Image (cartoon, rainbow, N blue to C red):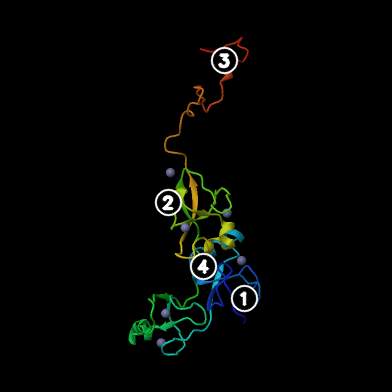
């Protein structure tokens, strides 16, 4: 099988990837695959939101050997996030982690700080649906400028509220999530706004420079005295 590359960030060939079941199959050159890091930062949610529920993802993982004992890994394991994430990656089976000081030995043999993450052997890792939030403001995509009235992605690494960085589903599905913050990685929230009116709706618009007060109600012609030809008399 030819190596798979992440459609969002381009990394690869991948040892584990989330593959879309609605796009061409794994055996095809044009399958839609995402690396673990992009998958964990909303790239699956962006693709499924954009193309519909058939475009759900399944995790595929190549057979892994423990880099300490050379045995095939058959349970959850730890993977070094500082080493390469392709065929040169560094994995440890739990026996080596707990029984053979595998993490400490790996750190001692290499110069930089190595942080391990747990990899679940189970391949059922569902994407999350957009989480609702209440707002009385308008939201815009910071990439294409489109107004955001349904589900979108909010960056946790930029400013807060609607003055922060937000991204529509289309921009997110086209690699926008990855391109936004390579280092340090900005994690996104997958959210959908529930629009509520402002707490105190204004009764009138602010006075214009000329001093005339506009109201937000149309003139009440029906209640004018008979004989009035449709003009307001000035008071
Ligand atoms: Zn990626
Ligand atoms: Zn797809
Ligand atoms: Zn091992
Ligand atoms: Zn390492
Ligand atoms: Zn507000
Ligand atoms: Zn956009
Ligand atoms: Zn950001």
The residue drawn where x is 42% and y is 35% is 200
**Which one is in front, 162 or 199?**
162
The residue drawn where x is 39% and y is 77% is 112
| Mark 4 C-beta closer than 8 Å to ligand 1 | yes
**First in sequence: mark 3 vs mark 1:** 1
Return the x and y of residue 184 as percentages of the image width and height.
44, 64
Image vertical order of residue 147 relative to residue 94, above or below: above
Return the x and y of residue 163 as percentages of the image width and height.
46, 48
Q: Which residue is mark 4?
A: 38
Q: Which mark is residue 160?
A: 2
Q: Give the class, few, some or many, for how many residues have Cα within 10 Å of label 2's Cα (few <14, many ≥20).
A: few
Q: Which mark is residue 232?
A: 3
Image vertical order of residue 81 relative to residue 45, above or below: below
Q: Secondary structure at mark 4?
A: helix
**First in sequence: mark 4 vs mark 3:** 4
**Which one is in front, 225 or 17?**
17
**First in sequence: mark 4 vs mark 2:** 4
Label 4, label 2: how many angstroms apart (C-alpha)? 22 Å
**First in sequence: mark 3 vs mark 2:** 2
Tell whether label 4 touches label 1 (CB within 8 Å). no
Label 3, label 2: how many angstroms apart (C-alpha)? 47 Å
Tell whether label 3 touches label 4 (CB within 8 Å). no
Q: Secondary structure at mark 1?
A: loop
Q: Residue furthest bottom?
A: 70
Label 1, label 4: how many angstroms apart (C-alpha)? 18 Å
Q: Which residue is mark 1?
A: 26
| Mark 3 C-beta closer than 8 Å to ligand 5 | no
């Amino acid at each position: 099988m030819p190596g798979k590359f992440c459609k969002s960030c381009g990394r690869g060939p991948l040892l584990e990837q989330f593959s879309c079941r609605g796009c061409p199959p794994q055996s095809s050159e044009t399958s839609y695959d995402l690396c673990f890091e992009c998958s964990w930062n909303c790239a699956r949610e962006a693709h499924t939101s954009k193309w519909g529920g058939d475009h759900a993802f399944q995790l595929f993982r190549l057979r892994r050997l423990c880099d300490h004992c050379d045995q095939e890994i058959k349970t959850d394991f730890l993977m070094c996030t500082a080493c390469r994430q392709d065929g040169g990656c560094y994995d440890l089976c739990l026996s080596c982690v707990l029984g053979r000081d595998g993490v400490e030995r790996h750190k001692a043999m290499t110069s930089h700080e190595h942080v391990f993450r747990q990899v679940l052997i189970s391949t059922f890792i569902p994407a999350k649906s957009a989480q609702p939030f209440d707002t009385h403001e308008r939201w815009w995509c910071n990439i294409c400028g489109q107004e955001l009235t349904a589900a979108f992605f909010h960056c946790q690494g930029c400013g807060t509220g609607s003055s922060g960085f937000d991204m529509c589903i289309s921009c997110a599905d086209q690699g926008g999530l990855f391109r936004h913050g390579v280092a340090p990685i900005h994690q996104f929230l997958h959210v959908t706004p529930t629009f509520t009116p402002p707490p105190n709706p204004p009764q009138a618009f602010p006075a214009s420079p000329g001093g005339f007060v506009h109201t937000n109600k149309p003139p009440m012609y029906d209640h004018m005295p008979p004989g009035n030809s449709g003009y307001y008399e000035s008071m």
